[in-house]
Image (spheres, grey):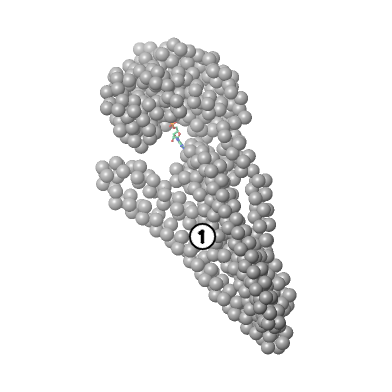
Amino acid sequence: MTNKKTNANYGPDKVRGIFAYLFGLSGIINILALTGAFYMLQIYDRALTSGSVSTLVALSVLAIGLYLFQGIFDILRSQILIRLGARLDQQLAPLAHTVSIEMPRYGYSTSEAMERGRDVDTLRAFLSSQGPIALFDLPWMPIYLAFVWLLHPMLGLLTIGGAIVLGLITLIAELMTRRSAQSMIKASVTRNSVADSNARNADILHAMGITARAVERFEIANRQHLESQTRTSDISATLSGLSKVLRMMLQSAILGLGAYLAIQGDMSAGAIIASSIVTARALAPVDQVIAQWKGFVSARRSNRRLAETLAVIKDKSGLVELPTPSQSLVVDNITTVAPATGAVLLSEASFELTAGQALGLIGPSGGGKTTLARSILGIWPLLRGSVRIDGADLSQWNEDFYCRHVGYLPQEVALMEGTIADNISRFAKVPDARMIISAARAAGIHEMVVHLRDGYQTELGPHGTALSAGQRQRIGLARALYGDPFLVVLDEPNSNLDAEGEEALTQAIASVRRRNGIVVIVAHRPSALQAVDMVGVVQAGRLVAFGPKDQVLQPNKARPVVVERAAPMERPARSLVAE
Ligand SMILES: Nc1ncnc2c1ncn2[C@@H]1O[C@H](COP(=O)(O)OP(=O)(O)O)[C@@H](O)[C@H]1O
Ligand SMILES: [Mg+2]
């Protein structure tokens, strides 16, 4: 919701304005940087020749003043860059984090997502390094060249030639590091993925004695990462060493040429030293740019990727707040593809539920039940078709709509780091104790929670590990029921439940129906179907049957048969599928 605002703050116009200002400031700094050379010239050619101490004093006072100004402007420039970096970070980090949260939904690994989140850090680090300062100084090089040229055109030519050679080295650095930097990033993502997956499966690794193998897998990935890193660093170190040597040679060559010109009587002694000082200053940014090239390349890439990333975030701030839903859920001919691969997982599913109805989705494993549940909630994008609540397509639901009117219990219950109360109340800023307790009661977990030492304030730790699987599932159920949402989607909520838990689930579904909500429940075990009135069969990525429970589940047939062999029912129920 704040996306739009922050985007506008970090408007390219504003940043461009600051850059123009910094460019101007750099111009002043670079002109002031000629102070030393002028001072030298004046001393040699005026003070010394005239032998006037007062001239010397006046020149010195002037030079000190100019030096001070240069220092102040230099500090000012660094401070602006540091602040620009910090402000950029402040505004973009939450957005980049939003993207890291969104990306795994589309099939990206968490390390890839985190990598995107780090783009902001990279950008900020570059802005507060010497890199941008060198880039701002570089365009002002002609000032120095002109100065040297005025001293003697030969010196000018030599400096220009040196600058061109150094520039070429920069170009070579760019071309050579580009590819290896890319493979370095890829290797780093792979390494982090392996590390991440190993850490998350610590139990399995230990129980089955495969820790050593997991470490080996990490080691291989790590070695690749190190290799590509070494290659990249090698290239930039070599080129930066080369440029340093060249620069020193150029420096001496200028001195030598100056001396030659002085011997020939074409130049004064002061000019030799002045030209030496000025060329040193002229070439410094080139040197800096080469040294900072790596940082510049990664900042540029981060900037580009960040722009891409920010474009992905849908700005939902303009969405009109929808009224509290009370009538229907319509799934209209939806087709869903796997976000990562593009494979069709569910095709042309249609059905309609009205307030007070509960739909049980059954079918063989891998049939597409979870996919259907995810599609209804907009977790996975739809290729075709639409999902509407009270006529409003899910593209019109904003965050707040989801938070207030949708409850979801995923197949793999994921609780978050925080207390039980935090988790049930969905991290509400002002949790409503009454609502938390009523949701916990509805999920049949209130007694269990109050018997814990810290009750609702019990810290769950990462992934809710402080609880058993069944307890986690019921807290997840309470979270789905919190705030009496209109649409409650439960994906195999009974997979870890005991008889008592299943009874609570049945009661919960019944109570959502009583208050005119809609429930969609994916059921692996038929015991969860007690409180539903509609049943859908999902098989091989299609909704092959949909209708009232007693029609779809033909009476007098063993229930497991219905679940395992849904195909025979396809014909009688087909007419009920809304198409
Ligand atoms: N993230 C994913 N990317 C690609 N395919 C997936 C993904 N998740 C599930 N699938 C595939 O989609 C099909 C349906 O899966 P799912 O909806 O989870 O089945 P169910 O919940 O009925 O057991 C399966 O063939 C599964 O391999
Ligand atoms: Mg499933």
Q: Is residue 478 or residue 344 the one in the foreground?
A: 478
Specify the quadrant of the image occupied by residue 451.
Answer: top left
Going by the image, does 46 lie left or right of 477? right
Q: Position of residue 131 (x, y in %)?
A: 57, 59
Query: In the picture, residue 425 is in which quadrant?
Result: top left
On screen, 91 above or below 153? above
Question: If the image is split into quadrants, where does the C terminus sit?
Answer: top right
The location of residue 450, given as percent across then percent down, is 30, 22
Q: Residue at x 45, y 20 (%)?
A: 483
Residue indicated by mark 1: 180
Q: Quadrant of the N terminus?
A: top right
Position of 262 relative to 445 (above/below): below
Count of residue discs: 1
| Residue furthest out toward the front | 54
**Residue at image location 57% in from the left, 53% down from the top:** 79
Q: Secondary structure at mark 1?
A: helix
Given residues 450 and 35, the one toward you in this image is 35
Residue ID at (54%, 69%)? 239
- Name the spot of residue 414 as percent of width and height, x first: 39, 32
Q: Position of residue 447 (x, y in %)?
A: 29, 20
> What amino acid is labelled 1 in the image?
Ser
Q: Is residue 334 visible?
A: no
Question: Can residue 456 be seen by looking at this rendering?
Answer: yes
Q: Residue at x 45, y 25 (%)?
A: 430
Instruction: Give the quadrant of ligand 1.
Output: top left
Crowd band around label 1 with a 10 angstrom C-alpha radius: few (<14), some (14–19), many (20+): some
